[in-house]
Amino acid sequence: MAALFDRIRTRIVPAGLTAIGVALLAAGLLSFTNPVAADPIATPTSTPSPIALAPTPSPLITLPPIASSAPPSASPSIPTNRVTTRVRIAALKIDLAVIRQPDLSYPACNVAMYYQDPRLGQPGGGRATYIYAHARKGMFLPLLTQSKVSNGKKMLGMVVEVWTNDDQRFLYVLTQVRRHVPTSSAFIAPFAVKTEQLWLQTSEGVGTMPKLQVVGEFLSQEAAPHAEANPVPKPVDCR
């Protein structure tokens, strides 16, 4: 009996299962799915339908083509009546109203003054803004005092604030200290400037003595409260 069961288990049952499988395959009821390797030579039997893709969002900042020949946009023009109204160097405790010198024979006291010339400009105009004042207490004396210590090295990096009558505040950082500049050549360098700069000047003595010039490079511009940008100047004739 044992031999009969072994014969049924090892021969008859597998043969029967094989026969059933062959019948099912022939009838199309049984299939095997295997991964298909890509074949560049084989021609597909059907064309797959296109898949709709969601539109790609546009970037927030777009750049013009590298080969674009379009001219650059013009810089916004500044008001033609813009003038400097105030200058402050907090690190040196300098804070003065700025005016145009009313009498060309001698600068006023208790204020700073801007120099008016077609070769110079006002803040934001892309040229040198030239501001000067006496080397007296309450005016530009701290500039002269600091220039005598290591040639003014400590002033480099100081920030200068300049306000204008159209309620704007400009920031400059001091980058140069020019000592002993002869009066006859004081304007040669600032007249040649073609970028946004600030020039501060004071005297190193009385009359036609050499001048001290401190130069600042532009940092930023922002709107300012009207009262802050337009202090009431109180010039004094100190001849």
Image (cartoon, grey):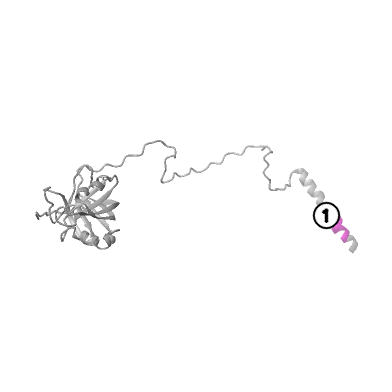
Q: Nearer the viewer, residue 193 or 64?
A: 193
- Residue sitting nearer the eye, 195 or 151: 151
| Picture quarter with the N terminus | bottom right
Residue 63 is left or right of residue 161, and the answer is: right
Is residue 171 left or right of 50 when viewed as pictured? Answer: left
Residue drawn at (85%, 58%) of the image? 10
> Which range is magenta?
5-13
Look at the image and say whether residue 19 sits in the magenta stretch.
no
Residue 123 visible in the snapshot:
no
Query: Taking 146 as reference, is 58 above or below it?
Result: above
Magenta segment, prevailing SS (helix, strand or loop)? helix
Q: Image point 57% across, 39% down: which residue? A: 50
Which residue corresponds to mark 1? 14
**Is 30 located above or below residue 149 in the figure?**
above
Which amino acid type is shown beneath numbered disc 1?
A: Pro
Q: Tag 1's secondary structure?
A: helix
Say left or right for 141 vs 76.
left
Residue situated furthest top in the rendering? 69
- x then y, percent, for residue 115: 19, 48
Compared to residue 54, the image places residue 176 above or below, namely: below
- Tell me the residue at 86%/58% (across/down): 8
Residue 189 versus residue 143: which sits nearer the camera? 189
Q: Quadrant of the C terminus?
A: bottom left
Q: Position of residue 78 (x, y in %)?
A: 25, 43
Residue 94's quadrant in the figure? bottom left
Can residue 202 be seen here? yes
**Residue 183 image position (x, y, % from top left):** 19, 50
Is 7 part of what is drawn in magenta? Answer: yes
Which residue occupies the foreground of this view, 223 or 122? Answer: 122
Residue 6 at what x, y percent from top left? 87, 61
